[in-house]
Image (tube, helix red, strand yellow):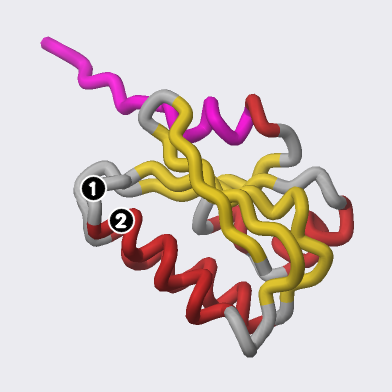
Amino acid sequence: MRIDVYTQDDVSVVEVSGDILFSNWKEFVDKVSNLIDKGHNKILLSLEEVNYFDSSAMGGFICIFKRLKSVPDGKMTLFTSKKEHIDILHQAYFQSLMDVCSDMSSALASLSKTVDSVAN
């Protein structure tokens, strides 16, 4: 597994390649947790180059999601165009917790959404 991180606007894009398995999911979570500790509160997890992820990886996604919920304006989006990944994430109802996008522009846009306050 390889993890690359870059920032686009105010979004931290975490690109993972290889497999996310029981043997390395903790390394993955620790890397993203370190970003959150440094003040990165909008995380886009790109699974585009992930060949395979198991249930421990899905648990890792939830760990990161829960960690982000504890920081102001924390939000996470998953991005993958791979149908098999999207099917698995939807079967596990991930879309009820976070945005699951099949294209990068939609994923970035989902993290740029702001809540408009209504002035009366």
Quadrant containing the N terminus in the rendered view: bottom right
Q: Secondary structure at mark 2?
A: helix
Q: CA distance from mark 2 to mark 1?
A: 5 Å
> Residue at point 77% right, 53% down?
49
* Residue 40 among magenta residues: no
Task: Name the residue nearer the viewer: 41 or 35.
Answer: 35
The residue lying furthest to the left in this view is 120
Quadrant containing the C terminus in the rendered view: top left
- State the image coordinates of residue 83 (x, y, percent, origin top left): 87, 52
- State the image coordinates of residue 13 (x, y, percent, origin top left): 52, 42
The residue lying furthest to the top in this view is 120
> Residue at point 75% right, 49% down?
48
Location of residue 105 (image quadrant): top right
> Residue at point 80% right, 70% down?
52
The answer to the question of whether label 2 and label 1 lie on touching residues, with beta carbons closer than 8 A, is yes
Vertical relation: 62 (above or below) 68:
below
The residue lying furthest to the bottom in this view is 23
| Three-letter code, disc 2 | Ile
| Three-letter code, disc 1 | Gly
Vertical relation: 14 (above or below) 118:
below
* Residue 112 among magenta residues: yes
Vertical relation: 15 (above or below) 34:
above
> Residue at point 49% right, 39% down?
6
Q: Tell me: 30 left or right of 59.
A: left
Task: Name the residue nearer the viewer: 26 or 97.
Answer: 26
Residue 36, numbered label: 2
**Magenta span of residues:** 106-120
Q: Give the residue number, with chain letter if any, for mark 1.
A: 39
